[in-house]
Amino acid sequence: MAIETDAVIIGAGPCGLFQVFELGLLGIRAHVIETLDRAGGQCTELYPDKPIYDIPALPSIGAQQLIDNLLEQIAPFDPVFHFNSQVTNVTRLDDDYFHLTTSTGSEFKTRSVIIAAGVGSFEPVKLKVDGIADFVNKQVFYSVKKPGLHDGRDLVVLGGGDSALDWALNLVPTANSVVLIHRSEQFKAAPASVAKMRELCDNYDMQFLTGNVTGIVSDQDAAKNKSTLTAVEVTSTDGITRRVDLDHLLVFFGLSPKPGPIADWGLEMNKKQIIVDTERFQTSVPGIYAVGDTNWYPGKKKLILSGFHEAALAAFAIKERLNPGEKIGLQYTTTSSKMHQRLGVDDPYKEQTAAA
């Protein structure tokens, strides 16, 4: 039996989570479908400790802390999450309802669909070296989910972007050694991170090498039928190949975005982004909306801040769609008793009113 609901949100990144909040304020409960095993999207998967500086009223907040705060904020609205699940098909049933199916076999009958899938499903760009796949999630890692796993280890970090520099710097205090390897002296990471890396190298707290990993070295334990990665071979621009010993190899070559099934749903697209209007953030299919990095309109800026604004306007548009002809008034969370009730907070003006 299909789960019947007023709203299904595709994606549990920051914009998808804030969409839950904006819908909840208007009395609309949502189901959230996410391909990953937890909420947070790229904030959680790629840079949980990276500071974000452009969230209003928060001079600085870590990416994972932002997600934790959003989850706390939406708790009063009791959203239903469906993790490790991807929407595979969307079919319009009639003017009011859509039918959704997922990769796990779940079905939904919903009156509105909000796509907050960011750049779509994504996977790390892999290191293309023979034999490396045998060591993935054992000694080779494309993300850092448990920093403590690398304590006391000899680490080699590959990449020149923010993730590579951030993790190299963060792991220096707890690792036995850290060697950063990048193909050139040109970095995409923040200049401050690059400067800090060079300072640590000057103080012999870590090393930096230019070049590409062209091979691996491993030891085979025949008795245990186990192979251990012991080093990588690094070929520099001068053509010389050097051996760099290691315990763990951390690879940060970026992500390969994949739009996934959304690209086949008949929505009007601008390259890989979904075209929306700027009044409702509705797509070319009435009843389907898109917020965050997944959408496009003239002047679009891929900022979390922009996605929050889009989610607010989309929520009002969805409320109007669910209640045609009804006037949807704007109520403020500061003063509205209805908002306080939905949020589960005490009315700050109640005692003042009673006293008067």
Image (tube, rainbow, N blue to C red):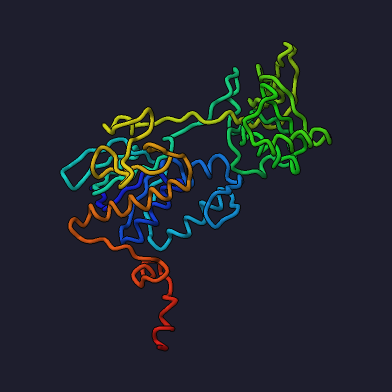
Seen in the image, is 238 located left or right of residue 40? right
Q: Toward which corner of the image does residue 246 lie, by quadrant?
A: top right
Q: Nearer the viewer, residue 301 or 104?
A: 301
Q: Nearer the viewer, residue 102 or 31?
A: 31
Seen in the image, is 294 located left or right of residue 47? left
Query: What x and y, as percent, mark residue 349?
Result: 42, 78
Q: Toward which corner of the image does residue 356 lie, by quadrant?
A: bottom left
Query: What x and y, as percent, mark residue 225?
Result: 63, 25
The extreme bottom residue here reads 355
Relative to 183, say whether 199 is above or below.
Answer: below
Query: What x and y, as percent, mark residue 83?
Result: 41, 45
Relative to 127, say whether 173 is above or below.
Answer: below
Seen in the image, is 27 located left or right of residue 250? left
Q: Residue at x 58, y 45 (%)?
A: 48
Q: Nearer the viewer, residue 111 or 154?
A: 111
Q: Residue at x 37, y 45 (%)?
A: 33
